Image: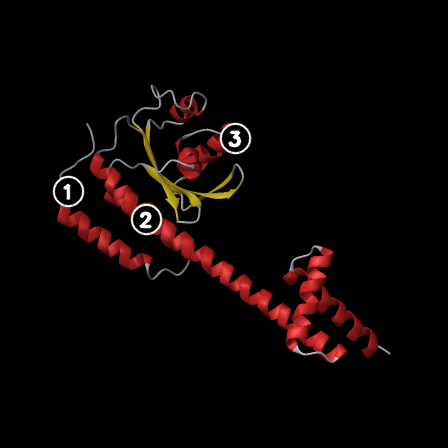
């Protein structure tokens, strides 16, 4: 027997609205992503387990907010075999649907592995921004032909929430990194200004020229200058 499709549309809309409110008041990124995967299980009856696959590097992926151990195992299989619907979605495809891994020929190595793990169908949604792909939301079912077109639409909504959360977290990390770099460059400028009697513009110009000459990023060079200054101060204070 297939999944129950009798849930009224207004109930689904209400559930999504409630989930959305919780996404915007999370205690952490992990809580937000777990809210997405748990909502997928509660809103889409066919989902037996779910997770979010995040791109961690060239051909490297990390499983997040898995509702059980099974999605983590499936992701590891796909990374090892370098094929599968989750990887396809994370790399390039906007959406990947598999109705039956037993007969789908797109993944000749992963398909039998999925069947052996007890999974017969899946939905994978690419998580992306205008700048880059972040990963994929993956929904798995133990039965074949488990998902409907309505399930796809709900999955797309949840994938959007996951993408926004990951994008915001990435931007926050970049912002913190930028603040740290700006602070260390400011320290290096101050040291050069004090030591050589130059102004802030001249100090930054000196750091920039040294950066180009040494082929070292400005922030990295600034950190080295600060470290050298700290060592020098320690040497003077110990005399």
Q: As drawn, is 173 to the left or to the right of 219?
A: left
Residue drawn at the location 51% of the way across and 59% of the way down: 174
In the rendered image, which quarter is residue 123 located in?
top left
Vertical side of 214 occupied by 75: above or below = above
Question: x and y percent of residue 80 in the render?
Answer: 52, 30
Callout 1 environment at 10 Å: few (<14), some (14 to 19), or many (20+)?
Answer: few
Callout 2 environment at 10 Å: few (<14), some (14 to 19), or many (20+)?
Answer: some
Q: As drawn, is 100 to the left or to the right of 71?
A: left
Question: x and y percent of residue 111 in the render?
Answer: 40, 23
Find disc 2 in the rendering and name its residue.
Answer: 160
What SS does tag 1 mark?
loop
Find disc 1 in the rendering and name its residue.
Answer: 7
Label whose residue precedes the other's in the sequence (3 or 1): 1
Residue drawn at the location 42% of the way across and 39% of the way down: 90
What is the CA distance from the residue labelled 3 to the residue labelled 1? Answer: 39 Å
Residue drawn at the location 65% of the way across and 76% of the way down: 200
Question: x and y percent of residue 197 in the render?
Answer: 74, 80
Label whose residue precedes the other's in the sequence (2 or 3): 3
What SS does tag 3 mark?
helix
What is the CA distance from the residue labelled 2 to the residue labelled 3? Answer: 27 Å
| Residue 131: image tag | none
Find disc 3 in the rendering and name its residue.
Answer: 80
Q: Could you tell me if the residues under marks 2 and 3 are in contact, i.e. CB atoms within 8 Å? A: no
Nearest to the eye among marks 2 and 1: give it: 2
Question: x and y percent of residue 107 in the render?
Answer: 42, 24
């Amino acid at each position: 027997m297939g999944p129950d499709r009798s849930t009224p549309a207004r109930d689904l809309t209400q559930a999504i609205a409630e989930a959305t409110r919780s996404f915007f008041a999370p205690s952490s990124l992990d809580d937000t992503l777990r809210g997405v995967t748990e909502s997928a299980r509660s809103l889409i009856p066919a989902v037996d387990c779910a997770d979010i696959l995040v791109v961690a590097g060239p051909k490297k992926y990390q499983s997040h907010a898995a509702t059980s151990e099974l999605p983590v195992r499936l992701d590891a299989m796909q990374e090892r075999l370098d094929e599968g619907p989750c990887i396809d979605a994370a790399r390039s495809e906007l959406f990947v649907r598999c109705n039956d891994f037993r007969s789908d020929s797109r993944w000749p190595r992963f398909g039998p592995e999925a069947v052996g793990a007890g999974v017969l169908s899946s939905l994978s949604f690419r998580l992306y921004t205008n700048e880059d792909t972040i990963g994929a939301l993956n929904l798995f079912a133990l039965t074949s032909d488990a998902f409907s077109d309505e399930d796809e639409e709900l999955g797309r909504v949840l994938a959007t929430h996951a993408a926004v959360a990951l994008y915001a977290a990435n931007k926050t990390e970049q912002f913190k990194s930028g603040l740290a770099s700006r602070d260390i460059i400011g320290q290096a400028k101050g040291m050069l200004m004090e030591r050589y009697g130059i102004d802030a513009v001249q100090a930054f110009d000196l750091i920039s020229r040294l950066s180009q000459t040494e082929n070292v990023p400005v922030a990295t060079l600034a950190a080295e200058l600060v470290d050298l200054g700290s060592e020098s101060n320690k040497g003077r204070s110990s005399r």
